[in-house]
Amino acid sequence: MEKETKKKTKTTTKKVETKKEEKKVEKKVEIVEEKNNKKKKPNIFKRLLNYFVGVKDEMKQVTWPSRMHMVKYTIVCICLIIVFVFYFLGIEIVFAWLKDAIVLG
């Protein structure tokens, strides 16, 4: 009975080891194939030209806001900045007052 279990464990460990080795070999083969399949990069000037052509095509698809919308957005932005300035100024004053109260108190 013991002999049978020893034989089974030996064969299973051999199978596991061979599977691991096969996976390692497959990974190495994939890496080599990827290196061989890589195409040579085009010239730097061609790549730059392709980039700017793509940028031009994307810029054509942009919907730009009108002048009236830009004025409204600018006013809203400035107002929000002013609100946040006073908010953080208030927080700063409260913390300064608390610090003075703790130190002097």
Image (cartoon, rainbow, N blue to C red):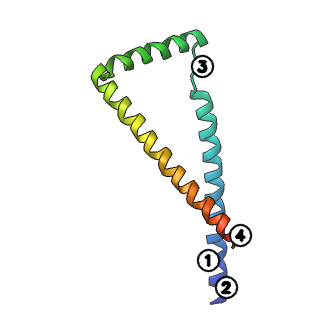
The residue where tag 4 is placed is 104
Nearer the viewer's eye, disc 1 or disc 3? 3
Nearer the viewer's eye, disc 4 or disc 3? 4
Query: In the image, is residue 10 above or below residue 35?
Result: below
Residue 32 position by quadrant: top right
**Amino acid under label 4?**
Leu
Label 2 – label 4 distance at C-alpha: 86 Å
The residue where tag 3 is placed is 40
Name which residue lies at 63% across and 59% down.
Answer: 96
Secondary structure state at the residue bearing disc 4: helix
94, 104: nearer the viewer? 104
Residue 63 position by quadrant: top left
**Amino acid under label 2?**
Lys
The residue where tag 1 is placed is 8
Q: Earlier in the sequence, mark 2 or mark 1?
A: 2
**Amino acid under label 3?**
Lys
